Amino acid sequence: MKGLLIYIFAILFFVSGSIGRKGFGPGEQEWGFVEVRPNASMFWWLYYTTADVKSYYDKPLIIWLQGGPGGSSTAYGNFEELGPLDTDLNPRNYTWVKDYNVLFIDNPVGTGFSYANAASGFVTTNAQIASDLLECIRGFYNQLPKFKSVPTYITTESYGGKMGAEFALVWYRAQKAGTIESNLKGVALGDAWISPIDSVMTWAPFLLSTGMVDTEGFKEIDTAAKITKNKVETGEWETATNYWAYTQSVVLETTYNVDFYNILEKIKYSNYQLSPQSVLYYDGDTIYRNFIQRRTHSLDSLMNGPVKEALGLKVSHGDQSGTVFDYLTEDFMKPVTNIVELLLNETNLNVFVYNGQMDLIVDTPGTLLWVEKLKWKEADIWKNVSIREPLVVEDIVEGYYKAQANFAMYWVNRAGHMVPRDNPAAMELILQDLTSHPNKMNKSKN
């Protein structure tokens, strides 16, 4: 199997036809590290677009931030969701690289190929994450300065949305102040961990409405969720993270191990053995390994084998991911709705929210709750006047959207947590809207 993998890679390597730097797989690529702070190095990996254009810089730059925290953009986002190759190294026909330049960043420091040389290299707050990301972009521009003028958009998933929202705000402020030369235009928050407690509090009713639990199961989950909410309201943030994991374990027990990332995924029967009470004593690393980690053996082998070799990297991929989460357990359950409000009130960036209808971990009812509570200048118009339209691809309703000014929300059908993978047709339209002028989307009731 290993020999076959190397053989496939060799073919892809030599037939790519690119005139620039060779990476892993087809097309022209670039990658590198940025020391964002002492003992803290962040890894980025760029895929130049394969679109038929005179210049790469004629197409926008799309940045992808994975969730977790501790999930790798260069691994999971790239090979599982939207990069040019899937985990079996087959070409992905809906890859974003066909239409955009795509930049994957392993973030926060310690995630994926990014690494910390000391404890001080890890972050403990979302603000520190945003600051590191801005430094990473500065380093990226230092190496590839022609991208400074290219329209750029941050796209995110899950906890990546929490990180990406604040990143977009600090980047916009720096851009406006003239301390960075760039062309940031928008941010998309996909199934985003913006208001964690709104997600947790809607798990029970969502599962009841979809038939995943009965009334007794609903009561068990709702009771656990209310304890979590109490910890949030009293500011016991690290304990709130443990009770979030506790509530998740109650869900797994009552549903016989439902897939939190897509409730319609087939699961093997399991008489759930993990005691929810024991979860309350987990440390951050253990919580990460049991409730966050989406790694597979094949993906680990790919990143620490052919990919690492092809890119000439000396660090191992994913060794510090659990440590990343451990350092952020105090910050994990804190909301950033105030950051989204600042984005809408202070900036002219496109701010998009999208959610898969079959996602549980960040369910659509919870997302709609925090969106409708946002305090921004056109909130009442968006809620009461703007029309919710169908998102149609080849006569198929792939979802719905509702837009006003520079804000839009998308409800995505037939998708779970990983919208780019589950419904690429809908995702393609969302990206087209994101990278176009927002006024094209404004539709209101007469």
Image (cartoon, rainbow, N blue to C red):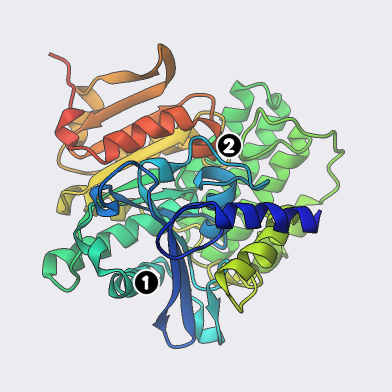
The residue at the point 51 percent across, 28 percent down is: 357
Query: Crowding near pointer 2: few (<14 within 10 Å), some, many (20+)?
Result: many
Q: Residue 393, relative to residue 113: is it above or below? A: above
Whether residue 372 is visible, yes or no, is no
Query: Crowding near pointer 1: few (<14 within 10 Å), some, many (20+)?
Result: many
381, 91: nearer the viewer: 91
Instruction: Say what amino acid the circle numbered 2 marks.
Output: Leu
**Residue 311 location, quadrant:** bottom right
Left/right of residue 309 with respect to residue 419 in the rendered view: right
Q: Position of residue 404 (x, y in %)?
A: 20, 32
Quadrant for the C terminus in the image: top left
The residue at the point 49 percent across, 38 percent down is: 420
254, 393: nearer the viewer: 393
**Residue 383 location, quadrant:** top left
Residue at label 2?
360
Q: Residue 199, relative to residue 42: is it above or below? A: above
Residue at label 1?
136
Distance, label 1 to label 2, CA atoms, is 32 Å
Q: Position of residue 19 (x, y in %)?
A: 40, 60
Q: Position of residue 430 (x, y in %)?
A: 35, 34
Numbered circle sitting on residue 109: none
Q: Position of residue 248 (x, y in %)?
A: 66, 46
Whether residue 239 is visible, yes or no, is yes
Q: Earlier in the sequence, mark 1 or mark 2?
A: 1
Instruction: Say what amino acid the circle numbered 1 marks.
Output: Cys
| Of the two numbered discs 1 and 2 in the rendering, the one whose residue sits closer to the viewer | 1
- For the residue labelled by badge 2, is the local secondary structure a helix, a strand or a loop? loop
432, 260: nearer the viewer: 432
